[in-house]
Image: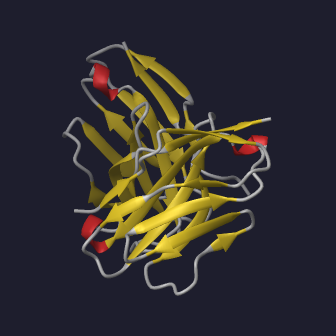
Amino acid sequence: AQKITQTQPGMFVQEKEAVTLDCTYDTSDPSYGLFWYKQPSSGEMIFLIYQGSYDQQNATEGRYSLNFQKARKSANLVISASQLGDSAMYFCAMRGEDSNYQLIWGAGTKLIIKP
Amino acid sequence: DAGVTQSPTHLIKTRGQQVTLRCSPISGHKSVSWYQQVLGQGPQFIFQYYEKEERGRGNFPDRFSARQFPNYSSELNVNALLLGDSALYLCASSLAGVEGTNTEAFFGQGTRLTVV
């Protein structure tokens, strides 16, 4: 069965610093997709970035990049030049055949950016 | 263009009651999925519907049911509410009917259900 593990329940980071949020996963699927979502206090899940298991390059979207290490089964999110508005919950999720392509989610990391 | 809309935003119900939550997907999206997010946890998949047919069901009791209408909007029903049903219920829409590894889901703001 597929599983996502986020080991950091909470993080405090100084504004303008870079931050890395950890995500490890477990799957027997050869093909899968990894996602990061941001959830502000309003509740909406906001898509940030996607990485396919066969993608050769690490995904990047503006200030977000994904450090994908397939052999270690990790997909860490890197936020560069953090801003106060980045304070939120961050969830790592994956899709694969093993889960019938439904999103499997980690427990999340609460990120607080300090001014 | 409107995003995924859910109603109501907040709801308080008593144990044993029944509740109906509503979701309108993004225009053009034919797939709707429902997730339950208990406080402090990640979302758990409940149902997926595409073209009015159930395409997937998570590990939830039969008290949970859903349907999708011809306009692709969806309702989630929960009967005989328990205290443990208190959660944020998220609806997500996507273009694809057959989900792939790269299918992006777009979420609404959720309905926060409190059972007392």
Q: Please report the residue visible at 62 percent of the width from the left and 60 percent of the height from the top.
A: A78
| Residue B106 visible in the picture | no
Q: Give above or below for B109 relative to A80.
A: above
Would you place residue B88 above or below residue A46 in this image? above
- Horizontal side, residue B21 vs residue A37: left or right: left
Q: Residue at x 45, y 49 (%)?
A: B74
| Residue sitting at x 58%, y 84% | A57
From the viewer's perspective, is residue B56 above or below residue A15?
A: below
Q: Which residue is located at x 51 percent, y 43 percent?
A: A109
Residue A35 located left or right of residue B19 = right
Could you say which is closer to the camera, residue B77 or residue B69? B77
Q: Quadrant of the C terminus of chain B?
A: top left
Q: Return the x and y of residue B37 as percentages of the image width and height.
A: 41, 38
Image quadrant for the N terminus of chain B?
bottom right
Q: Position of residue A56 (x, y in %)?
A: 52, 87
Q: Vertical placement of B46 versus B96: above or below?
A: above
Q: Position of residue B16 (x, y in %)?
A: 26, 17
Residue A67 appears in view: yes
Question: Is residue A37 or residue A11 the one in the foreground?
Answer: A11
Q: Position of residue B115 (x, y in %)?
A: 37, 18
Question: Left or right of A71: which side holds B79?
Answer: left
**Residue sitting nearer the eye, A55 or A9:** A9
